[in-house]
Each structure stands twice: as structure tokens, then as C-alpha cells.
């Protein structure tokens, strides 16, 4: 059984207006969301870029929240103008605060744009031999060579008569040479018993002993580093 962990890159190109208004900011946020969703479908991110992506998303959410605050403040100012024309000084101060918030939102949007352009450049780079990539239709997955000869080493004296049963799925990092560089548990046996935990650990160790024919481009000439899933059926 094989599984692939897909890592996604998000790039959110935004455009900033010369003289931002609240409607323009709302339009920019909408455009940002639309372009992000579109780019999300086209880009395959690597695990190394995931933290950068999360930071970009947090920044985008912050900019959106600040834009919402600015819009609400402007609406409050306009309402105050209609209700009390004599409160000019207070209205001016509130309007200045709204403009300041809108300016801060504009600066945050510009910063997100720069970050996402950087992510785009990284994602559009053609991978070379040994790069960590996400499996797709243009790649041939790694193939386990000795999986049938790999058995999790359970302590028979402990598990005799109560041997755990079920499926354990392990995600392995396979180098461009077919070696397992790392392994992590995706799905363990149900329950939190010592037997289940020890069986999960045995499957992790077994996964590290698997030898693979590495993942490669369709032409078979360029080999890559990938994360793939390996399943163990305990019966």
C-alpha cells in the first residue's frame, strides 16, 4: 500500500491601489482570495515551503482583518455624520483613524504580495536530481523492491496469544538513490495499549529497512526525493 503526502504551495498575487478606499480594499481581498484558490490548484508545494506558506496565510488573514476594521470604522463615521452634523471634530478624528487603519492594511497587502511572489518563483523552479518533490502525474512513484521480505519484528514472547491485528501505515522519505531517510507514523493500530504502541514502533523500524527503486521523471533519467506511504497488515 502506498500513500503520497501532498504539500501545497500557495501564492497570492495582490495589487495595491494608488489611493486605497474601503471598496478597493475589499476588491483587493476578493481578488487575493480568487487568485490564491486558482494558484492552489496549479502549484504543488514541497514540505520545505510549508512553513513559509503558513506565514503568508497568517499575514493575509491579518490584512483582511485590518481591512474589515477600517471598513467598519468608516461606516461608523458616516453614521455619526448623518446623526449629528455638529460633531465635526470627533468625526474628523475617527476618519483619520480609519484612514490610518486602511494605510496599515495596504502596507500589509503589499508585504503579502512580495512574499507570494517569492513563493511563486520557488515553486516554478524546475526540479533537478535529488530535489524533494510531490508526486504527480508527471512522475513515476518509488517502487519497493524488498517489501515482501520485510516483516515487523514483534516480541513473540509478549504478543503470543494476543498478537495485535490491523493495518499500520508509515510515511517514508525516499532518497533519489532509493534509501529510506526518515519514517513517520500516519496510521497506527487502534487503541492506546502497550501492545499497539510496540507494534506501531516495529512497523516504523521495518519501513526503514525497505529498499526502493526511487521516484523519477517519466523519462526515467532524473530521480527525486519523495515522501510515500507504506502499509503493513498485521494478522
Image: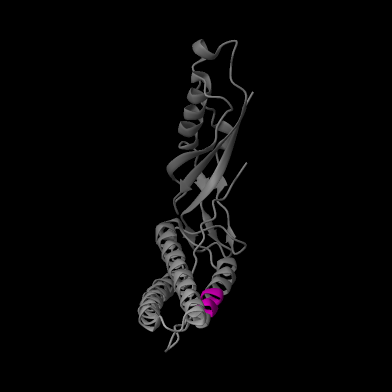
Please provide percent x and percent y for residue 2. Answer: 60, 45
Please provide percent x and percent y for residue 193. Answer: 52, 20
- Display coloring: one colour
**Magenta span includes 27:** yes
Between 20 and 32, the residue placed more toward the observer is: 20
Please provide percent x and percent y for residue 30. Answer: 56, 74
**Magenta span includes 41:** no
Please provide percent x and percent y for residue 125. Answer: 45, 72
In percent of the image, x 59 and y 71: which residue is there? 38
Q: Quadrant of residue 121?
A: bottom left
On-image quarter of the C terminus: top right
Between 6 and 102, the residue placed more toward the observer is: 102
Between 190 and 46, the residue placed more toward the observer is: 190
Asked if residue 91 can be seen in this view, the reply is: yes
Task: Give the overall secondary structure of the magenta segment.
Answer: helix
Q: Quadrant of residue 234?
A: top right
Left or right: 143, with 49 as reference point: right
Between 71 and 50, the residue placed more toward the observer is: 71
Location of residue 172 with respect to 163 vertically, above or below? below
Asked if residue 130 can be seen in this view, the reply is: no
In percent of the image, x 47 and y 29: which residue is there? 201
- Count all numbered tags in the image, as a single digit: 0
On-image quarter of the N terminus: top right
In percent of the image, x 58 and y 68: which residue is there? 37
- Residues shaded magenta: 25-31
Amino acid at each position: 500500500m502506498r500513500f503520497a503526502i501532498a504539500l501545497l504551495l500557495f501564492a497570492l498575487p495582490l495589487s495595491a491601489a494608488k489611493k486605497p478606499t474601503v471598496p478597493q480594499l475589499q476588491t483587493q481581498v476578493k481578488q487575493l482570495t480568487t487568485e490564491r484558490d486558482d494558484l492552489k490548484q496549479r502549484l504543488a508545494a514541497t514540505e520545505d515551503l510549508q512553513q513559509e506558506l503558513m506565514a503568508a496565510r497568517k499575514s493575509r488573514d491579518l490584512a483582511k482583518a485590518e481591512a474589515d476594521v477600517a471598513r467598519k470604522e468608516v461606516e461608523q463615521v458616516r453614521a455619526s455624520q448623518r446623526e449629528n452634523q455638529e460633531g465635526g471634530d470627533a468625526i474628523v478624528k475617527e476618519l483619520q483613524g480609519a484612514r490610518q487603519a486602511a494605510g496599515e492594511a495596504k502596507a500589509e497587502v503589499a508585504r503579502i504580495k512580495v512574499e507570494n511572489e517569492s513563493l511563486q518563483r520557488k515553486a516554478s523552479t524546475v526540479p533537478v536530481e535529488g530535489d524533494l518533490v510531490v508526486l504527480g502525474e508527471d512522475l513515476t512513484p518509488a517502487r519497493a523492491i524488498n517489501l515482501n521480505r520485510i516483516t515487523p519484528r514483534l516480541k513473540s514472547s509478549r504478543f503470543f496469544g494476543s498478537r495485535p491485528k490491523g493495518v499500520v501505515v508509515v510515511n517514508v522519505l525516499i532518497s533519489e538513490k532509493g534509501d529510506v531517510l526518515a519514517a513517520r507514523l500516519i496510521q497506527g493500530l487502534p487503541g492506546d495499549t502497550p501492545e499497539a504502541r510496540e507494534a506501531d514502533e516495529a512497523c516504523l523500524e521495518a519501513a526503514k529497512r525497505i529498499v526502493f527503486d526511487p521516484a523519477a521523471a517519466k523519462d526515467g533519467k532524473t530521480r527525486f526525493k519523495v515522501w510515500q506511504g507504506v502499509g503493513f497488515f498485521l494478522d
